[in-house]
């Protein structure tokens, strides 16, 4: 969800060409799958398309390719550091750490509460944009 929310936000402020935004999995369960249907529906409720997206595995080379690597929860952060062999440049951060409510994004996998996830992702992405689009 966060990839497409962030892309939508930067497009709305005319900065789409200034950001390279991509998502990648830190586990292997969903590799090759399209966006999870309830997440796709939540994005569509807000006029955001995620068509054509399939999950890919994060790789060690992503660390050098991107300026920032953003995880949704502490489990992601741990996996990201393992995949990247650490975080010597301090590029691996949690999305909600850009907000006034640091911590994990609500995980809908167990709760099925995609509305809570939507709110967290939108708040985090907006805070991230506010921080870097100045």
Image (cartoon, helix red, strand yellow):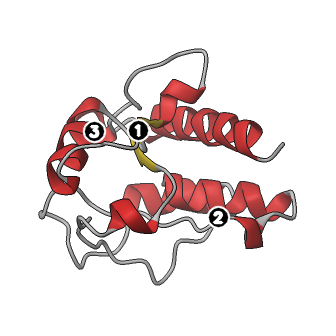
Local SS, label 2: loop
Residue most toward the front? 88
Residue at point 55%, 65% (across, down):
21
Label 2 to label 3, Cα distance in Å?
26 Å
Relative image position of residue 122 (x, y in whole percent): 62, 40
Relative image position of residue 4 (x, y in whole percent): 57, 62
- Between 21 and 45, the residue placed more toward the observer is 21
Can you tell which of label 2 and label 1 is closer to the viewer? 1
Local SS, label 3: helix
Q: Could you tell whether 134 is left or right of 102 in the image?
A: right
Residue at point 24%, 48% (across, down):
80
Residue at point 57%, 33% (across, down):
119
- Between 73 and 47, the residue placed more toward the observer is 73
Label 2 to label 1, Cα distance in Å?
31 Å
Can you tell which of label 3 and label 1 is closer to the viewer? 1
Local SS, label 1: loop
Residue at point 34%, 75% (across, down):
34
Relative image position of residue 53 (x, y in whole percent): 43, 77
Can you tell which of label 2 and label 3 is closer to the viewer? 3
**How dense is the environment of label 3, judged by Cα within 10 Å: few (below 14), some, or many (20 and up)?**
some
Residue 67: assigned label? none
Residue corresponding to mark 1? 90
Residue corresponding to mark 3? 77
Residue 20 picture quarter? bottom right
Residue corresponding to mark 2? 48
Relative image position of residue 95 (x, y in whole percent): 49, 36
- Between 99 and 18, the residue placed more toward the observer is 18
**Badge 2 or badge 3: first in the primary sequence:** 2
């Amino acid at each position: 969800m966060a990839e497409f929310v962030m892309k939508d936000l930067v497009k709305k402020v005319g900065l789409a060409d200034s950001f390279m935004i991509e998502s990648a999995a830190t586990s292997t369960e969903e590799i090759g799958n399209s966006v999870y249907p309830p997440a796709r529906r939540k994005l569509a409720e807000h006029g955001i398309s995620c068509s054509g997206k399939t999950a890919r595995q994060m790789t060690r080379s992503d660390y050098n390719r991107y300026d920032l690597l953003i995880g949704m929860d502490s489990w992601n952060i741990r996996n990201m550091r393992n995949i990247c062999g650490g975080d010597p440049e301090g590029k691996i951060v949690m999305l909600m750490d850009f907000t006034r409510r640091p911590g994990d994004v609500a995980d809908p996998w167990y709760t099925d509460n995609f509305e809570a996830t939507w709110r967290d992702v939108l708040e985090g992405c907006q805070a991230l944009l506010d921080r870097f689009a100045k």
